[in-house]
Image: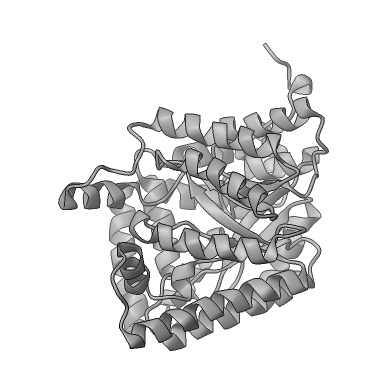
């Protein structure tokens, strides 16, 4: 059995994981994770909280901000998020900024999202510890339009103009990212719009990743076709003289994907089981690390084995731990035992930090709470780690 000193990185070190939290903050996290262990409580709180925010009920925003918001978000604005960025960097941890508003529908909203993303890029350029910002294509283009394009339906003149405007927004963001030397992650979304997203992001990579990687696509490995698609994307990049940006995730729309496939009578794009997802995810990691000179990748996972697997691969190949093309990322407020221990050991480890007004990010927060209160969620692990650190501190 390996001793702690023989490990590439030790994820059981709770002292390092929670060093940035005061005793009061640790107790608060313990209370919050304990509440989130109850799916019925989360469901009820999510429903009531969303309605209360929409209705503008007194004190609701304050309650949300002081509880779940502070756990999972960096601040209500970029300026307020600076404190979080600085604190993370004290512990050698990078920040990936994400304007936390979910998918939008109006041109005004799309322009606002573009504007906020440009501001985040500018903000990132002023912080050594913010190498990347994150964005959703559906924050800058209408979902139904993306779906119509993927179906191959003919666009009417008004829609052609709308699509041209959307592509211009995305191009402006990518151009600005390269100009400011800040990367941009484009999230993966539902399979029935993902082909359209892939086409747009690939064209942006071809345009802006000719030297260093600035634009990244996201590959959801719970889809059974994504490992093959990742390899083909890399081959296309090599053949066309640009480098691939690849953020690897397991995925976030599994139930929705299966339900839609069943309702519409087509084969589900989802892997047959978790083992198949894990196998493809780790194979994708290995492929990216073995081709690190032409792929800049981010291992965006809360999975301990996948994190350790990549750390070991880096060690075995003799690649510098802090090589800019090899990165790890976890959500702010989750998996601190992975992020901070990787960072302390010298790897490029980052927190994905959403920010925005409480009203804007409530849908994100609710999704975060619901996903992690499920049977397969990670609240049990989080609670156990916080409990261990409380015992170590004797509080």
Give 247 or 308, whichever is nearer the viewer. 247
Q: Position of residue 141 (x, y in %)?
A: 43, 75
Q: Position of residue 160 (x, y in %)?
A: 39, 82
Q: Residue at x 40, y 42 (%)?
A: 223
Q: Which colouring convention does the figure follow? A: one colour
Quick one: quadrant of the C terminus? top right
Q: Give the total number of marks visible in the rendering.
A: 0
Question: Can residue 297 be seen here?
Answer: yes
Q: Residue at x 72, y 41 (%)?
A: 292
In the image, residue 107 sits, relative to residue 103, either above or below, namely below
Question: Can residue 395 be seen here?
Answer: no
**Left or right placement of residue 84 versus residue 89 in this view:** left
Residue farthest to the top, as pictured: 1
Q: Position of residue 37 (x, y in %)?
A: 39, 45
* Residue 80, picture quadrant: bottom right
In the image, residue 343 sits, relative to residue 95, either above or below, namely above
Give 33 or 4, whichever is nearer the viewer. 4
**Left or right placement of residue 182 versus residue 105 in this view:** right
Q: Residue at x 35, y 31 (%)?
A: 273
Give 149 or 254, whichever is nearer the viewer. 149
Give 210 or 277, whichever is nearer the viewer. 210
Q: Residue at x 69, y 53 (%)?
A: 243
* Residue 163, picture quadrant: bottom left
């Amino acid at each position: 059995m390996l001793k702690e000193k023989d490990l590439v990185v030790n994820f059981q070190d709770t002292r390092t994981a929670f060093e940035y939290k005061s005793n009061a903050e640790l107790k608060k996290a313990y209370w919050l994770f304990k509440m989130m262990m109850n799916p019925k409580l989360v469901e009820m709180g999510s429903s009531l909280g969303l309605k209360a925010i929409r209705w503008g009920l007194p004190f609701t925003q304050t309650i949300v901000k002081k509880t779940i918001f502070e756990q999972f978000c960096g601040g209500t604005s970029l300026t307020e998020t600076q404190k979080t960025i600085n604190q993370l960097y004290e512990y050698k941890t990078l920040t990936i900024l994400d304007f936390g508003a979910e998918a939008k529908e109006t041109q005004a909203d799309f322009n606002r999202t573009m504007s906020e993303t440009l501001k985040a890029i500018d903000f990132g350029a002023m912080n050594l510890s913010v190498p990347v910002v994150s964005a959703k294509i559906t924050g800058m283009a209408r979902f139904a339009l993306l779906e119509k394009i993927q179906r191959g339906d003919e666009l009417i003149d008004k829609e052609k103009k709308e699509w041209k405007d959307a592509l211009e927004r995305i191009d402006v963001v990518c151009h600005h990212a390269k100009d400011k030397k800040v990367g941009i992650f484009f999230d993966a979304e539902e399979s029935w719009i993902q082909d359209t997203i892939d086409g747009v992001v690939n064209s942006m990579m071809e345009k802006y990743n000719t030297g260093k990687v600035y634009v990244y696509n996201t590959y959801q490995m719970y889809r059974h076709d994504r490992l093959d698609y990742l390899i083909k994307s890399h081959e296309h990049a090599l053949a066309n003289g640009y480098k691939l940006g690849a953020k690897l995730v397991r995925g976030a729309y599994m139930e929705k994907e299966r339900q839609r496939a069943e309702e519409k009578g087509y084969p589900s794009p989802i892997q047959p089981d978790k083992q198949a997802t894990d196998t493809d995810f780790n194979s994708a990691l290995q492929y990216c690390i073995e081709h690190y000179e032409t792929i800049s990748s981010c291992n965006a996972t809360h999975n301990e084995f996948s994190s350790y697997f990549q750390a070991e691969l880096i060690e075995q190949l003799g690649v510098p731990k802090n090589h800019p093309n090899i990165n790890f990322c976890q959500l702010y407020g989750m998996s601190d035992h992975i992020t901070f221990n990787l960072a302390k050991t010298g790897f490029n480890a980052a927190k994905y930090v959403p920010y925005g007004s409480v009203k804007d990010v409530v849908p994100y927060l609710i999704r975060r709470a619901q996903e992690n209160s499920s049977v397969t969620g990670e609240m049990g692990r989080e609670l156990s780690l916080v409990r261990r650190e409380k015992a170590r501190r004797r509080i």
